[in-house]
Amino acid sequence: MTLELNDMQGLLVRGFGNLQGAQYLLLRFTEAERSRKYIKELLPLLTNALQKPDDHAVQLAFTYEGLSFLALPDETLQSFSREFKEGMTEPHRQFVLGDTGENTPENWVWGSKASGEIHLLLMIYSHNAETLAQKLVQEEARAEAYGLDLLHSLPTGMLHDHKEHFGFRDDISRPIIQELNKKPTSEKEMTFPAGEFIMGYKNLYDEFAPSPVIPPEFDKSDDLPDLTNDSAFKDFGKNGTYLVFRQMEQDVFAFWEYLLGQSKSKEEAIRLASKMVGRWPDGSPLTKTPDKNDPDLSTFNDFAFWEEDKWGLKCPIGAHIRRTNPRDHLVTEKTQKDSAEMASKHRMLRKGRPYGEPVCGDLEPSQLMELPRDHKERGLHFICLVTDIRRQFEFIQNNWVNFHKFGGLEYDADPLIGNHYKNGNIKTDEFSIPEYPIRRKLCDLPNFTLMKGGGYFFFPGISAVRFLANYD
Ligand code: HEM
């Protein structure tokens, strides 16, 4: 099935890496009629997936509360997934996601009930600071003119050499969408049907990804396509998807201080940190080059674990990249093939960007370890796009990132981003490093990240935005 790129927002197929500066605005509608006029004005400004902007890009997403505020038909609101309707901070979900203790939504700056109901996420990307500042002035004025409240404005940007704040290259491993006709760069890399990430297309189960619907009588301007296989409804989700947003503060000083405290040298601290990530700071994967980094492999993704590193002697079983994508070695599965198939059902299109000033410009770990604490906030605006929040993002976060028995481990959560705590017989603050003849265990890991905000959004196709603009 051909992808309707002109009807998709661009973030689905690119990361706007050439547009280095960006700002995310979190807004609230105050009046439905004016809100629709606002959406109508934004419509021509949205960047679609056919465009390759070199100046700026604008993207738009809605919360469930935002769509409810626009008074969509009940049938439509009900047709969204349960996770999206209940939201990220629903009490049971806090437990599922590990948003407990100091990570509780009660402490978040945005996204909790107490911090104000968010309706809309407006993402503005730009190739330089000047254009970004201009666009921000324009968009803030436009929002104000239509009565929207600007609740939060989150600047975000890219760091040296695609790194995140701890000093590691990020954004290397990305699922490839079959219908985009890109060839995998290696034989081990899988390709994915578009329906894993875009509504209106078939997913890995050979089914159309579940999509929210509109009863046809409400689509007076005939903006939406029929739902595939069921013409009793219009497809409101086609060419859209869900967007998961988590603002995670990173304590770079605590991270390197802890690792130095466990090491006899800076080199050893870097080796331990790389064991936690599963890649060296330059991005080269431990599974391929376990003893030292190899700059030629800094974007290398052609590896799996079953044959190359069954016991985690190169890349520990509990390393961040091995938990979040166990590839062909899920310890619970019987065969390599079963495992690869099972793991493939839990992938995400990651689109996040760091925020805040880096501790130092080149993010070299040996520098990061030496510099004194500066008390500035920095972290990652983690964003991912998925058609099934529960099967994809929540499964990874719950069963792989935070599960202390993942892969036969006992007391470990993800060393980099897991919620580390002790609670009676349960503790999650260890990190096991398989080594021969005796494994090494790091204990009393503090939390290196802290949740500051988050939410589930609907990232609509262009026709769905047009429908919202015309809907009354
Ligand atoms: C502050 C928070 C985070 C930091 C610093 C971080 C850092 C990294 C780094 C350095 C990599 C290696 C680069 C790559 O393989 O592309 C990576 C990979 C990855 N991360 Fe994170 N990450 C964070 C949060 C998350 C969260 C919340 C999730 C999902 C629940 C996640 C899922 C992944 C996935 C799926 C990969 C690719 C694994 C692979 O396919 O090999 N990350 N992350």
Image (spheres, grey):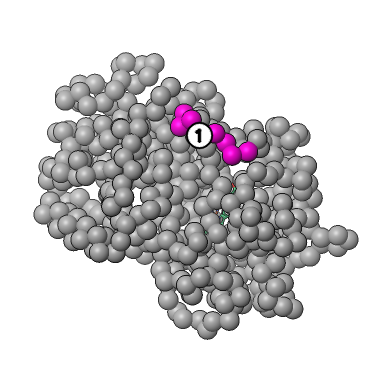
Judge whether residue 329 is colored magenta: no
Query: Which quarter of the rendering shows the N terminus?
Result: top left
Residue 329 placement, left or right of 67: right
Please count the marks in the image.
1
In the rendered image, residue 385, in percent from the top left (x then y), is placed at: 44, 43
Segment colored magenta: 179-186
Estimate how packed mark 1 is, as few (under 14), some (14 to 19) or many (20 or more) residues with alpha carbons within 10 Å: few
Q: Is mark 1 within 8 Å of ligand 1?
A: no
**Amino acid type indicated by mark 1:** Lys
Q: Residue furthest right?
A: 437
Main SS of residues in magenta: loop
Q: Quadrant of residue 68?
A: top left
Asked if one can make out residue 416 in the rendered structure from this viewpoint, the answer is no
Q: Residue at x 56, y 47 (%)?
A: 173
In the rendered image, residue 456, in percent from the top left (x then y), is placed at: 39, 47
Q: Quadrant of residue 200?
A: top left
Residue in the foreground of this view, choosing between 122 and 430: 122
Q: Residue at x 60, y 55 (%)?
A: 298
Q: Residue at x 59, y 72 (%)?
A: 365
Q: Residue at x 56, y 75 (%)?
A: 368
Asked if one can make out residue 216 in the rendered structure from this viewpoint, the answer is yes
In the rendered image, residue 165, in percent from the top left (x then y), is placed at: 50, 66
Query: Which quarter of the rendering shows the C terminus?
Result: top left
Pointer 1 residue: 182
Find ligand 1 in the image and state its quadrant. bottom right
Disc 1 on helix, strand or loop? loop
Residue 46 placement, left or right of 256: left
Q: Residue furthest front?
A: 296
Residue in the foreground of this view, choosing between 148 and 17: 17
In the rendered image, residue 179, in percent from the top left (x then y), is placed at: 47, 29
Residue in the foreground of this view, choosing between 95 and 229: 229
